[in-house]
Amino acid sequence: MAFLRSVSPSDLGPVIYGDGVILHVPQMADYEDWCSLRDQSRSFLVPWEPTWPSDDLTRSAFRRRLRRYWRDVREDQAYPFFVYRLDDETLLGGLTLSNIRRGVSQTCSLGYWIGERYARRGYMSAAVRSIIPFVFDNLRLHRLEAACLPSNDASINLLKGCGFTEEGYARGFLRINGVWQDHLSFAILSDDSRR
């Protein structure tokens, strides 16, 4: 069961504790761990992600990334999290709630990545399960959406295992590694998470 830690106003965002994982908004102190994990996992991640900018792993690019993250959190547009293992604070990957829409839709999109050496060990499933109560109870949204490539069996199984329902096939949905790719779309509703 996930819960939201009480944070001071000076903190840059929420900290969420899940089953063996901690999620927190990225900070500059995370740069070395992030850079190392992304660099070591590059060939594993590239087939599933947008094209990496040539300077993606530099400290200055990370600073720019943080400025965008912090602005998005302040403006309630997106909530990025790094996922750390609870027992030794090892960085495992990242998870982002983005495209937050209020008004009549009350929804957001979920994206995630995990370092190659931590894949298929249940860490990202724990992180996704811990973010669901945050989406519905704290952000007060109604719907959490996700999408993955039809060939990504690991993500399909993760989403279904976390209670998401497959909703259909979206043609040319996202540009992955420089190419517009079809995706399977998934969603979980606030009512689903309480069953």
Image: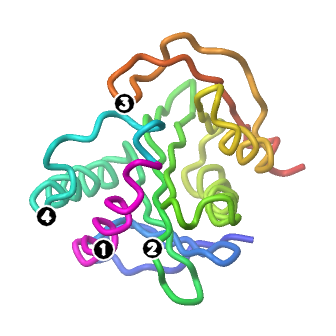
Instruction: Name the one closer to the observer, 170 or 78.
Output: 170
Would you say the residues marked 4 and 1 are in contact, meaning their CB atoms lie under 8 Å apart? no
Please tell me in which quadrant of the rendered image residue 133 appears.
Answer: bottom right
Mark 2–mark 1 CB contact (< 8 Å): yes
Estimate the x, y position of residue 174 in percent, counting from the top left: 44, 23
Decide: few, some or many residues near mark 1? Use Cα within 10 Å; few <14, some 14-19, many ≥20: few
Look at the magenta stretch and give its main secondary structure.
Answer: helix
Query: In this rendering, would 147 be left or right of 8?
Result: right
Amino acid found under the numbered disc labelled 3: Asn
Q: Earlier in the sequence, mark 2 or mark 3?
A: 2
Task: Determine the residue positioned at 43% across, 65% down.
Answer: 82
Q: Mark 3 sits on what residue? A: 177
Q: Which residues are magenta?
A: 28-44
Q: Residue at x 57, y 33 (%)?
A: 106
* Label 2 Cα crowd, 10 Å radius (few <14 / some 14-19 / many 20+): many
Q: Which residue is mark 1?
A: 30
Q: Label 2 belongs to which residue?
A: 91
Q: Residue at x 9, y 59 (%)?
A: 60
Structural distance between the alpha carbons of marks 2 and 1: 8 Å
Amino acid at the residue labelled 1 = Asp
Q: Nearer the viewer, mark 2 or mark 3?
A: 3
Identify the mark at residue 20; answer none if there is no mark: none
Q: CA distance from mark 1 to mark 3?
A: 25 Å
Q: Residue at x 69, y 66 (%)?
A: 121
Mark 4 to mark 1: distance in Å? 11 Å
Residue count near mark 4 (Cα–Cα under 10 Å), binned few <14, some 14–19, many ≥20: some
Specify the amino acid type for callout 2: Leu
Looking at the image, tell me whether mark 2 or mark 1 is earlier in sequence order: 1
> Is 161 drawn above or below residue 119 in the view shown?
above
Is 50 in front, or is 13? 50
